[in-house]
Image (cartoon, helix red, strand yellow):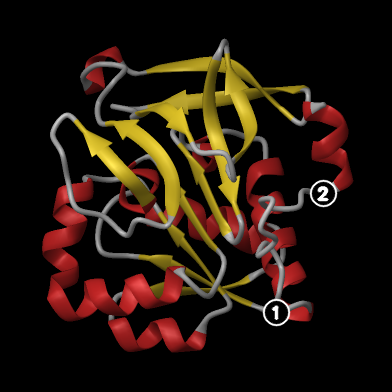
């Protein structure tokens, strides 16, 4: 199993280290053709509009094809890219996640913070840096983590997204959940494709019930 981390900008190396700690083989993706070599992709934080510029038209189209067929996990700016509706300002994206997300909803970098939220009904340290906010969640989207009343991590089919930075905390559960999703899809081509929405590991079902 090979996991790609989009390495155009942002905190991609922290994701690489976390995934390797969990036993995954990691490829830093800098060219569109490298997407053919991986089983799942992490799109890290950074600046979402800069990602679009660095990808270019051909890279954007290749990435758009990938996220529709293989597991993808976006954090912060990566979550913005995956959303089908972006505000503050409006922005084109990959459109595979049925959420409305507002950029920089929690303030400037100096106002960033570490908070405690819940993942699988257990406390989880969450690092927010110029974080977006999920303002609307579509009917096929599962909320898998919350901070207060706000959804901060979601899943729809083969796509996961978090508005915080799980790679910057000492807790590996969010990345482990993504690796479990990739493993599921390697053995079952229909994973996450049910009309009623994505299936979740039993641990998450119990925790969010």
Q: Residue at x 13, y 72 (%)?
A: 56
Q: Residue at x 34, y 89 (%)?
A: 33
Q: Residue at x 31, y 80 (%)?
A: 62
**Circles 2, 1 touching at the beta carbon (< 8 Å):** no
Residue 201 is situated, as x and y percent measured from the top left of the image, at 82, 49
Depth check, front residue: 156 or 132: 156
Residue reaching furthest front?
195
| Disc number placed over residue 189 in the picture, else none | 1
175 lies above or below 121: below
- Image check: 125 left or right of 152? right
Depth check, front residue: 12 or 206: 206
Please identify, in this view, whether the residue under mark 2 or under mark 1 is nearer the observer. 1
**Is label 1 in a helix, a strand or a loop?**
loop
- Image check: 119 left or right of 146? right
Q: Which residue is mark 2?
A: 201
- Image check: 4 left or right of 180? left
Q: Residue at x 38, y 77 (%)?
A: 65
The quarter in which the C terminus is drawn is top right
Q: CA distance from mark 2 to mark 1?
A: 17 Å
Q: In terms of image quadrants, where is residue 204?
A: top right
67 lies above or below 141: below
**Is label 2 in a helix, a strand or a loop?**
loop
- Image check: 140 left or right of 5? right
Task: Say few, some or many: other residues with alpha carbon within 10 Å of mark 1 (under 14 / 14 to 19 / 20 or more).
Answer: few
């Amino acid at each position: 199993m090979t996991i790609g981390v989009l390495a155009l900008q942002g905190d991609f190396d922290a994701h690489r280290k976390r995934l390797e700690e969990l036993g995954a083989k990691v490829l830093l993706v800098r060219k569109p053709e490298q997407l053919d070599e991986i089983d799942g992709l992490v799109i890290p934080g950074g600046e979402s509009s800069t990602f679009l510029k660095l990808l270019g038209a051909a890279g954007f189209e290749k990435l758009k094809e990938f996220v529709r067929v293989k597991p993808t996990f976006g954090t912060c700016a990566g979550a913005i890219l995956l959303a089908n509706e972006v505000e503050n300002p409006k922005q084109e994206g990959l459109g595979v996640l049925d959420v409305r997300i507002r950029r920089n909803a929690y303030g400037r970098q100096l106002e960033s913070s570490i908070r405690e939220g819940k993942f699988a009904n257990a406390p989880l340290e969450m690092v927010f840096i110029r974080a977006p906010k999920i303002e609307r969640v579509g009917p096929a989207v599962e909320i898998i983590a919350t901070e207060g009343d706000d959804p901060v991590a979601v899943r729809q089919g083969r796509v996961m997204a978090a508005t915080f930075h799980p790679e910057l905390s000492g807790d590996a559960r969010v990345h482990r959940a993504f690796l479990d999703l990739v493993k599921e899809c390697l053995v079952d081509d229909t994973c996450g494709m049910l009309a009623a929405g994505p299936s979740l590991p039993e641990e998450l079902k119990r925790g969010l019930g």
